[in-house]
Amino acid sequence: MTQNSLGDSAVQMAVHAQNNGVAANITHTQPLWLLAEVTYRCPLHCAFCYNPTDYDKHTHNELNTEQWIQALRDARKLGAIQLGISGGEPLLRDDIEDIVVEAKKLGYYSNLITSGVGLTEKRIQAFKEGGLDHIQLSMHDITEEINNFITNTKTFELKKKVAAMIKNHGYPMVLNVVIHRYNIGHIKEILEMAEALGADYVELANTQYYGWSLVNRNQLMPLKEQIDHAEKITNEFRQKVSNKMKIFFVVPDYFGNRPKKCMNGWGEVFMIVTANGDVLPCHSARVLPNMVFPNVREKGLEWAWKDSPAFNKYRGTSWMKGPCVTCPEKMNDLAGCRCQTFLLSGDAESADPVCSLSPNHYLIEQAIEDSKNPILASQPIIFRTDKNSKKYASGESRERVEEFHALP
Amino acid sequence: MENNIQHSDVFAIALHHRFQWEDAQQSYVILFPEGMVKLNGGAGEVIKRVDGKATVGDIVAELKMAFPDAADIEADIIGMFDMAYGKAWIRKL
């Protein structure tokens, strides 16, 4: 037998995705998760999308199939094992079939993260034959009205059809539901719908405020009491269904006292390659100042992960300052999220404002108050559209982003 | 704890889960939608024998033969089955 006895703790780590992120308790660094944001183009216009508001800049310089396949190979050599194929809407590319085949060949567990728009019988058949392991479908509400409103599209019936298609092809049914003011009152009905569709996993992802959702924060944020109630309903439902349907409730950090251990730490387990080839430790990293992120067109992923100044910048704890540096809880949260901290406070190295010990915590308290202000909340939602993105990218529109220290 | 697991039980890896050796980590892992567990050496030795045919009793006997020096190995193996079944990484046939 190996040196390990069977009596040792059997599980050294568990990595669960939450809202496309991870929560785990490991400290050695291998990019276990490769998220391929293969395009920022999307037929939906969700008000809570975390993609950058200036995404339109990156819709004309997408990596080609060969470059994606090379990225998959390089990341696998570094230890990547879970592959997320995401976007935008990945199905707007016609080479997802090729990417899936390569992922299978390399030994990835591959996850297609989709709105369902563009998933046809022909394509799902090709994915199945190519070895795609799982399809995560975003759902928005049990009502056609809210689904169509929040996505700014008429996609309600289509999503139900796609859910059935996924099930029929023997895929695990994983539903991701972003929770916000407009659907938080329907948690029980959403879970009942998930159960009726035969879902194996449901992720109830409370909106976190990045990208478009930060711009729409006053319009989307629910009340603390609503979140507490939703969590209570979720726990009751979880008891009822036990292991048959696993339910993840991603707690929103604005209403906690301590920050989230964002991405399980900067450059710890998570690596994103974006549509244009930028390599990032998290979805929003490009908001940070004075940072040059590697691009797969220039140097390979090994350099990006191990040696690039960007990936090393916030690894570990040596970059921290007060109150984090002497905080007994610093290993629990690694001072929270760098991007959120900079966006809201203008100082990327300070404590995440969601922490009650942060000198900038008043910013969160103010945001919560603002979201209850009927005048602010009645401003229109700004939907994620190419037109709006162009306005933000060109600087033409400063609407609702001026209070932030970078373009969300 | 052992009430849940009988020597006559036969298990397989759960649907939508995959068990494989990972060179980069020098360990066995179980993969499932958007998640994974890394198994230590002992746990890996148990799960790699879970093939939908061998009974728990077969696996206990085989591991006892393979690792004669390990003390009280049977309780550990049953404990591993109990946990893996509880976590739904394996399913009972």
Image (cartoon, helix red, strand yellow):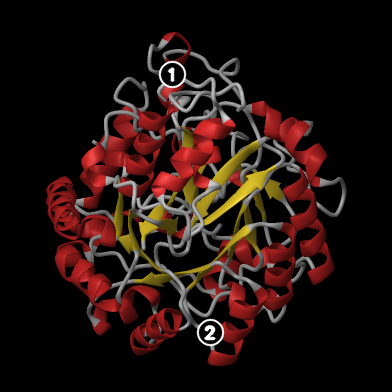
Q: Residue at x 74, y 71 (%)?
A: A60
> Is A78 left, or right, of A66 in this rendering?
left
Q: Circle 2 — which element?
A: loop
> Is A141 left, or right, of A232 in this rendering?
right
Work out which quarter of the rendered image holds the N terminus of chain B and state it: top left
Which residue does the numbered mark 1 point to in the structure image? Answer: A330
The chain to which mark 1 is attached is A
Q: What amino acid is found at the position of numbered circle 2 in the picture?
A: Leu
Residue farthest top in this picture? A326
Specify few, some or many for label 2: CA neighbours under 10 Å numbering under 14, 14-19, or 20 or more.
some
Which residue does the numbered mark 2 point to in the structure image? Answer: A119
Residue A325 location (% of width, % of height): 48, 12
Residue A105 location (% of width, % of height): 74, 64
Instruction: Pick whichever of labels 1 and 2 is earlier in the sequence.
Output: 2
> Is B41 left, or right, of A15 in this rendering?
right
Q: Quadrant of residue A1?
A: top right
The chain to which mark 2 is attached is A
Asked if the residue at tag 2 contacts the one at tag 1, i.e. Cβ–Cβ closer than 8 Å, the answer is no
Q: Residue at x 79, y 31 (%)?
A: A307
